[in-house]
Amino acid sequence: MSRVPLANLKPALDACRAEWQGALLQTIDRAWFILGDEVASFEREFADFCHAPHAVGVANGTQALEIALRLSNITRPDQEVITSALTAPFTAQAILAAGATPVFADIDPETLLLDPGSAESRLSPRTAAIIPVHLYGQVCDVEAIAALAAHTGAVLIHDACQAHGMAYDHRGPAAFSFYPTKNLGALGDGGALVLGDADHDRLARLLRDGARAPGHVSTQRALNSRLDEIQACLLRVFLRHLPDWTAQRQRLAALYDKELSGLPPEWLRPVAWHPRSTHVRHLYVIRVRRREELIQHLQANGIGTGIHYPVPLHRQPAFPNINSCPIADQACGEILSLPLWPYLPEDDVRSVCRQIWKFYLGSTAGTS
Ligand SMILES: Cc1ncc(COP(=O)(O)O)c(C=O)c1O
């Protein structure tokens, strides 16, 4: 492992070890592992946390998105779903899994979030849904995107897999991932669908569990996508710490902003943050020149980095595509994620920044 890895779950686990060990033992002693009290309690607590009436625990964020599409019967290839060209491939895999066709729109050149203008240019009579992705922890321009959806009758579904705790409105279902490195991460896979509508809540519960009526009779095509009791009991513990962990991420991101300011923006600039929303700082992403050399330099100095994501979805072989997304193409060649996790020592942030200054200027002038 790098001296300063891109992500490190251990300090957060250590910080609440007694709590999760106790919860785990109680859950195991109860000897009920699927769809029991822990999942039900977590669903209530996560819905409250999101200021939403309903949350349904599922197996992962990809299937939360798939179920959200199925809730609106978006299951046929002639139904198009517009989403961002810059996201995890799972966003589009979920669209394929539901049976619909992904259509990629370009991104805003500053925030790298779905550009409402580009999304508008992709509208067609076949548009059935729009999935804005709240990438890196920053909320999209939901007003503009919701207006587009309303204009065409398309369903709005939020990919909130990287945005636990961000303030967005609930004009459509929101899908969350609890992949371990997310701001709220399980110790394995997990996900949730947050809903405003009681009928959708009932249907989502059916769809995650084989659409079983009493007597083990499946009443419609469905998934097996259940959050399990062990993950739910851990998530309940971690959820109590999430506001503190988010505040830590925000503080560390502000420190990166400060330490990196002064570098020429044509060499390095952080991805812009729109003042419209809070930013829960899932990832700290910069745009850089000479990315590969910088990665090598940081690696040689024990600093881990990542690229989220190196290949835009309109260029991935799994997905059909007829559109160009030049801004996503350019961004994917420049973006770099720096280490960010709760309890990351501030001195480590400073030392990452010192190494970046050194790489570009051959000195550490400008850092504290
Ligand atoms: C933006 C985005 N969408 C969807 C997913 C899929 O979530 P999961 O890995 O829980 O299926 C992820 C996580 O990798 C993600 O970051």
Image (spheres, rainbow, N blue to C red):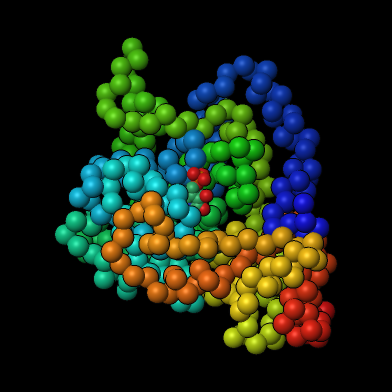
Above or below, comparing residue 336 to residue 6 in the picture: below
Q: Position of residue 235 (x, y in %)?
A: 61, 39
Return the residue nearer the eye: 284 or 198.
284
Residue at the (34%, 70%) spot, across then down: 324
Foreground of the two, 173 or 358: 358
Tell me if 26 is positioned left or right of 48 in this view.
right
Q: Residue furthest left?
A: 125
Left or right position of 157 against 355: left
Q: Residue at x 76, y 46 (%)?
A: 10
Q: Is residue 212 visible?
A: yes
Q: How many marks?
A: 0
Classify 107 as above or below 280: below
Up-down relation of residue 323 to residue 24 (above or below): below
> Percent position (x, y) of residue 188?
61, 37
Q: Taking 146 as reference, is 93 above or below it?
A: above
Image quadrant of residue 289?
A: bottom right
Residue 108 appearing in the image: no
State the image coordinates of residue 60 (x, y, percent, origin top left): 49, 40
Instruction: Residue at 55% x, 29% y: name it.
Output: 228
